[in-house]
Image (cartoon, rainbow, N blue to C red):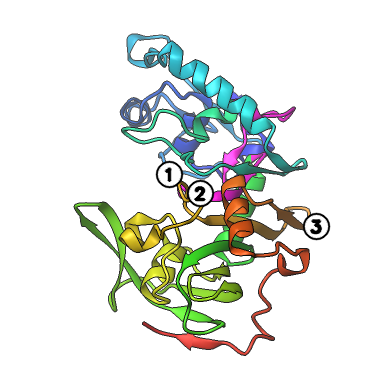
Amino acid sequence: MITVADDDNGSRLDKWFKRHFPNVSHGRLQKLLRTGQVRLDGCRAKANERLAIGQQVRVPPLDDPETTPPPKAKPHVHEAMRHLALELRNRVLYQDDEVLAIDKPSGLAVQGGSKTNLHIDGALDGLKLGAKDRPRLVHRLDRDTSGVLLLGRSRKATQWLTAAFQRRETRKLYWAVVAGAPPIDAGVIDLALDKHSGRQGEKMVASEDGKSAQTVFRVVDRASRRAAWLAMEPLTGRTHQLRAHAALALKTPIIGDGKYGGSAAFPDGFPKIKTMQLHARAIQLVSLSGRPILIECPLPSGMRENFEFLGFQEQEELAGFLDIDDLNLTRLIA
């Protein structure tokens, strides 16, 4: 008999099982529920039932072949994850009891896939930093995007932060270096996007039937018509939104983004464009305790080199969020 703790309040029963008994498969749990071996306060329960503090969950003996642990990761993968966790510890931008923010490098995936063994999610056990549980992902950044990545340090904090993103109460500021000159200095891009699968894999395309997507942007500086430094704030959270909006609506792809810009994203003469020039510069949020937090992330070396090459001056007064109410914004619909 296990008593539901405060941190598990409101969890679905199947999610609770996955967290506390990760080696029990979904099919195995369904069988235990159907046969009444798992009970909640002495009664039969369903997988989607919500738990409350103080309830008693009956867990039957699980020491049988069906619950044997999965094969361990290969030694070299485990060692690589350990080294990654140590590296990420040195990239912590902010830490309190609820929130952990790290500086994600370009080229590192947030979550794993069929061909991705090294990723941040797999290294989170090494980022507890004194907390009871491993931190949890709250949002994602593309593999090739650098900058602020937010993590929740408890289940409650993660739920709060996730809901804040969904309610658009959390603001994200990005810096990008784009190829070419945007047609206007500031505006709102209002261009619906839809997923399309092709030879290059999944890609976002403009579509009237797609999901609504809006981005506020401002040109911070220009290098004649060769390139521009943009501050961008997404008002929605679509996949590849900033990359697609820069290329499709502004006709100025982010430098280094071959998926959306093709050869135009790799202009000649730049000192370093091996990485995509898109950086999550800052996140503004309110914590679970009601405290406002601003987390900023310095430019990675590759972007800093290009800033210097183009003559862009990284000034702190330009690091702030776009003042949507005060800007006389043009609504750009492509």
Residues under numbered marks 1 and 2 in contact, where contact means CB atoms less than 8 Å apart: no
Magenta residues, start to end: 126-154
Tell me the tag on residue 272: 2
312 in the magenta segment: no
**Residue 241, image quadrant:** bottom left
Mark nearer the viewer, 3 or 2? 2
Q: Residue, x 33% and y 15% (percent of image)?
A: 66
Measured in 3D between alpha carbons, the distance from the residue under mark 1 to the one under mark 3, in whole angstroms, is 33 Å
Q: Amino acid at mark 3?
A: Arg
- The x, y position of residue 139, in whole percent, is 53, 51
Foreground residue among 241 and 252: 252
Comparing labels 1 and 3, the label whose residue is closer to the camera: 3
How far, Cα to Cα, is label 1 from label 2?
Answer: 50 Å
User: Which badge, 1 or 3, comes first in the chain's sequence?
Assistant: 1
Local secondary structure at mark 3: loop
How packed mark 2 is, by other alpha carbons closer than 10 Å (few <14, some 14-19, many 20 or more), is some
State the quadrant of the C terminus: bottom left
Q: Residues within 10 Å of mark 1 (few under 14, many from 20)?
A: few
Q: Which residue is mark 1?
A: 48
Residue linked to disc 3 = 291
6 versus 308 height, above or below:
above
Q: Is residue 238 visible?
A: no
Outermost residue toward the left in this view = 199
Q: Position of residue 172 (x, y in %)?
A: 61, 62
* Measured Cα–Cα span from mark 3 to mark 2: 39 Å
Quarter holding residue 48: top left
